[in-house]
Image (tube, rainbow, N blue to C red):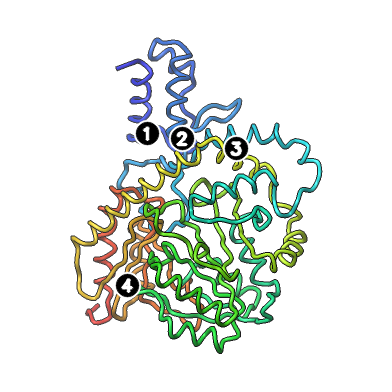
Amino acid sequence: MLKYEKIIKYIKKEISEGSLTYKKRLPSIRTVSQQFNCSIGTILKAYDKLEKDNIIYSSPKSGYYLLEDFHNINSSKNTIFDFSSGVPDIETFPYKDLQHCLNKSIKLHKETLFTYSDPRGLNSLRNVLKDHLHQYQIFTHEDNIVITSSSQQALNILSIMPFPNSKSNILIEQPTYYGMIKYLELNKTPALGIERGFNGINLNELENMFKYGNIKFFYTIPRFHNPTGYSYNKQEKMAIIKLAKKYNVYIIEDDITADLDLDKKNDPMFTYDTSGKVIYLKSYSKILMPGLRVAVLILPEILMKTFLDYKKWTDMNSPVLSQGALEIYLKSGMFDIHRRKISKLYSNRMTCLENTLSSLKQPKIKWNVPRSGYFACIYVDNKLRYDKIISTLSNQNIQLLDTRTCFLKEYRTDNYFRISISKTNEEKIKKGIPIVLDTIQKYLTYNKF
């Protein structure tokens, strides 16, 4: 074993034994150099490898520190089973690559930093995105592309701006993404719901809603739905688009997990739209890191001027450095490499989750586990003590989202449990999921307490 590898092994041993903890500075380079009787270059090589593996980070003029997620990572007593998170695993963040791209972005766009840029986004990034989106079977002109400061900003603006169909109600799936529901509630925006379960959506009910509901747009997550994990098939997508054209309803397609799909033939709804009714939205937060705050929105020309008016007086323009960094990251080919790596990681976790659930069959408990994505879902066909289940699991360091927040108040139900695998590795899945199912089974209301 090479000396720098011995140092890495030593640091990991110190972490596992609890000698090195979060916020505690690692031994100085000079100290380790003396301890192992080696050069400073060898220590730097070891620390650099630990940093690239997202185990430690460097603080200028201070030293090296352990990342928070590695604090007491091997201590079962303090292990957190995070099945609630909707953000990527910190271990997957391409820190070094994006740091390099940000540095290049500063040099490339330094003049733009001293003025306001086009609210549509950097022209150079939109040109790159036009070609990049071909991978998803998205073909559009760069003039139809707008860069927003996250997908949430795009949804917020679309929810409040007027549409050319002059309708006022927003239709959302039940359940759906919590951020959309919260924004609608805070702004008292009129919203209606339509049930979407493990078997998809009732198209007859959707047609009635489109026909009589005064629907401005239908917000949908066709691929790896949050929170059920279900994906529409091609026939369902085409049927929804046909109804939207017939009743003059727009569709907002939130394709937030497009990069995790292993099925290259699973095209977005936008691909099948010939009437300009589908608005396509894709974020880069879920595949790279949330702090990037860059999303791409594809709008039909008839909506562009109104949207840009609202966007300009929301933030003038989205952060230039983030846009520049994404442009470089895409052009360099680093994005494609990262996407292949990350989609395989989450697909493996989903397979592990499916296998674990299949070995623990219990009456009244059903589940949907997609091939990839972030979210699977457990459905309980029975009344249960939901609050008691969440609190009991929390006391055992198992975190679950209160999935009732994914419903409008009038549609709320206690039957769904979203299972996120974004920050939970396979070992934790195997250990944590049996506890989740046992706890649910324990608090079904037909049991005696």
Q: In the depicted view, which residue is nearer to us: 143 or 436?
A: 143
Identify the residue under disc 1: 15
Name the residue tied to disc 4. 379
Which numbered dot is residue 66? 2
| Tag 4: amino acid | Tyr
Q: Residues within 10 Å of mark 4 (few under 14, many from 20)?
A: some
Helix, strand or loop for disc 1:
helix
Callout 1 crowding tier (Cα within 10 Å): few <14, some 14–19, many ≥20: many
Of label 1 and label 4, which has the lower sequence position? 1
Residue at left offset 29%, top offset 17%:
1
Dot 3 amino acid type: Ile
Image quadrant assignment for residue 377: bottom left
Q: Earlier in the sequence, mark 4 or mark 3?
A: 3
Compute the Cα span from label 2 to label 1: 9 Å
Q: Which residue in the structure is indicated by mark 3?
A: 328
Q: Are the residues flagged by discs 2 and 1 in contact, CB closer than 8 Å?
A: yes
Q: Secondary structure at mark 3?
A: helix
Up-down relation of residue 410 to residue 227 (above or below): below
CA–CA distance in space, label 2 to label 3? 29 Å
